[in-house]
Image (cartoon, rainbow, N blue to C red):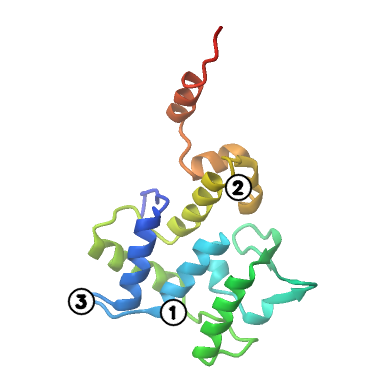
Amino acid sequence: MANKTTVALTKEQYDEIIDTMRNGGSYFRKNDRIATALVLEANLGLRIEDILNLKLNDIIMDGDRYRLNITEKKTSKKRTFTVPLPIYQYIKLYVMENGIKANEKIFPIGERAVQKYLKIVADYLGFENIGTHSFRKFYATDIYNNNNYNIVLVQQLLQHSSVATTQRYIGITSQMQEEAILGHMVLR
């Protein structure tokens, strides 16, 4: 994927990629571990390297909710956020089914292994410019679209330093901005 910008997944692409990973294809095996890691990336908005470093005991009970405190590997920024109960249960079930201890990495694999397998699946499905970051972009775009286009909310969730970075990230182009301006004429 060198010199190619990854794109955000559509919901349909997300579903198709995860289903294909869980079932396998004509020339590759199923891989529930990688599928689960990417599901978490798409649901927590973390980078894949941070997902691969997660341990169940990183998620702690805080009152009536679960909380995750991490230091992002790429930026070294501390990040604290709520993990919704269904996501915690999803992780806990995966850990139990796979005999993973609470203090062990949930996904003892490398980032490169995830990228290589994802490329095989994306090529098999005919999807272009899909990488692990496409799942984080899917998260960001979905949050943006489902929260009244609140770019500041997305910026805060992703811990971007500027709104401009977030706009590029979710694909808000200057052409889209111009179309929005032109579509909002209320002349009297």
Assign the N terminus to one quadrant of the image: bottom left
SS for dot 3: loop
Amino acid type of the residue tagged 2 in the rendering: Val
Residue depicted at 52% across the width and 20% down the height: 184
The 10 Å Cα crowd at callout 1, few under 14, some 14 to 19, many 20 or more, is some
Q: Give the residue at x 25% y 62%.
A: 125
* Residue lying furthest top: 188
Disc with the residue nearer the chain's start (2 vs 1): 1
Residue situated in front as seen by the camera: 35 or 164: 35
Residue of label 1: 33
Q: Residue type at mark 3: give it.
A: Tyr
Q: Is residue 184 above or below residue 28?
A: above
> How many other residues sit within 10 Å of disc 2, few (<14), some (14-19) or many (≥20)?
many
Q: CA distance from mark 2 to mark 3?
A: 38 Å
Instruction: Say whether residue 128 is left or right of residue 78.
Output: left
Image quarter where the C terminus lies is: top right
In the rendered image, residue 148, in percent from the top left (x then y), is placed at: 58, 41
Residue at the spot of label 2:
154
Give the mark nearer the N terminus: 1 vs 3: 3
Is 112 placed above or below 92 here?
A: above
The picture places residue 118, in percent across and down from the top left corner, at 35, 67
Q: Is residue 60 left or right of residue 33?
A: right
**Residue named by callout 3:** 27
Can you say whether 27 is above or below 49 in the image? below
Q: Are marks 2 and 1 in contact (CB under 8 Å)?
A: no
In percent of width and height, residue 22 lies at 35, 76
